Amino acid sequence: MTEPCDLTAVEARRLIGTKQLSPVELLASCRKPIDTVNHAVKAITDTIWPRAEKEAKAAERAVMSGADLPALHGLPLGVKDLDDAAGLINSYGSPIFAKNRVKHDDPMVARCRAAGAIVVGKTNVPEFGAGANSNNPVYGPSGNPFDPTRIPGGSSGGSAVALATSMLPICTGSDGGGSLRIPAAFCGVVGFRPSPGLVPTDRRGQGWNMIPTLGPMGRTVADTCLLLSAQAAFDPSDPLSRPIDGNTFRNPEAIDPSRLRVAFTEDWGTCPIDPGIAKTFRARIRKLKPMLAACDPVTPDMGHAHDAFGILRATGMLQSQRANYTKHRAKLGPNMIANYEEGLRYSAADVSWAQAEQTRIYRAVQSVFTGYDLILSPTVAVSPFPWSQLYQNEVGGKRMHTYFHWFSLTYMISLTGNPSLSLPMGLEPTGTPFGMMITGPAARDRFTLRAAMGIEQAVAGDPDLRRPVPDIVQLAKAPRITSEYHVCTPPLDSRSWAGASSAP
């Protein structure tokens, strides 16, 4: 029998609204997998049960009184450990902030709480969210729910694991180079990177930088839309924010895939990819093709995307990590030190070139949408690797030039800012989930989600394509994951590629 914690967020919210499910019952059900499997995967880093239980009882009283209920009423929520949530530690995965118990909610978290969500706890991340291995010196690693010895991805790794294991029905995340999409792919859930500014933030130091974004995660596209309906808003403190009614994302209607003209690319013409992942992707495309109006290969001119992203990412680190580097360098991990010092290597000419190349790449990708509705690609180029390995050194026989080169499939779209999500689509050969990245036209977030929902519904009856679910019973028997944090200085030699100074 399905436990309340196993329900989709949309179904749980419907049952709460019709007085068939108590928020108290739902919270208690979610606590069971947290108590029984978090030891093996370390998705949740801090909890606030007394307050959550008090709020669940208040939510139950509101239901019984017949009051108007907001979108997320009674739904337990996990908050990524980069966002402030009152009463909980926001460590950023760093020893500098290991005891940083905050008193106020981040504006995005406050909007979720105002929409009725019950904040349960924080979810694990890499140090300051840098990288796609959710392993940090404060809490150690998170494990993949399908194999706890492997990574769940990052930086929203804890959120993805919490969703996959039914600890929580909705979780927040963020995405710079793929931090919503990569863990969603590795854990078999949905992670949506919205257009920059759709989910506003006052935390973006470089206000016009479109690479870092906040966004939602859920087990299904509909669940993800439900959370987005509370996250999306207009906030004048964010220069990229625009007037928006978040309610437009609630209960969207799926688009019939037979109406969709789809382009696909295995590697964007420039990204390394493991042969097994490429083979799995081609098999998925063969199965999807009969469902679609068109499904054709495409290779946009991505030019020097690796260099452009590397420069913009590194110089962004100069802004976000300056105080930590100058005041607390001894407490920073080698990963963060290498990132910051990489940024010091670049000149104003390098940054100017990278911004111009980003603009050219943006226009090249948008040109694809003159003839197609979506672009499909693999979300990640490799299978989840052991969490003791900080990053992937080699993909498809090619040496990685930076510690983030292995997830270049996602940062291609981080450069352009197009709405993009990872949709679970069965398993790949290692027995871990395979994620299909679905990218939509610029600024057409709702259309992209509706199209993804249509594809999700079309494959739901296929055992090879539907969302996989981890074995919670076996996971409960797994040993406690270590708190060990492996330190190793990552390679950051991006000038050995084309190099900004020598690029045309």
Image: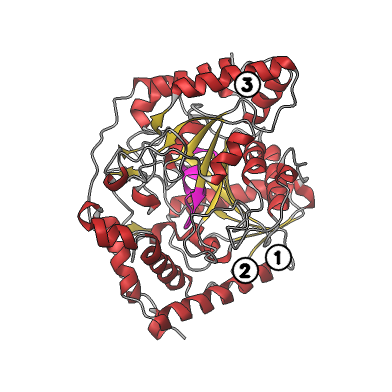
Circles 2, 1 touching at the beta carbon (< 8 Å): yes
Residue at label 1? 369
Disc 3 secondary structure class: helix
Mark 2 or mark 3, earlier in chain: 3
User: Which label lies toward us, 2 or 3?
Assistant: 3
Q: Which of the 4 image quarters holds residue 497?
A: bottom left
**Which region shows up in magenta?**
174-190
Q: Measure how far apart labels 2 and 1 are at the Cα level.
A: 7 Å
Q: Residues within 10 Å of mark 2 (few under 14, many from 20)?
A: many
| Residue type of the residue flagged with mark 1 | Phe
Q: Is 61 on the left-hand or right-hand side of 329?
A: right
Which numbered marker is on residue 474?
none
Residue at label 3? 59
User: Does the rendering let one see residue 293?
Assistant: yes
Q: Which of the 4 image quarters holds residue 398?
A: bottom left
- The N terminus: image quadrant: top right
Residue at label 2? 365
User: Which label lies toward us, 3 or 1?
Assistant: 3
User: Does the rendering let one see residue 464?
Assistant: no
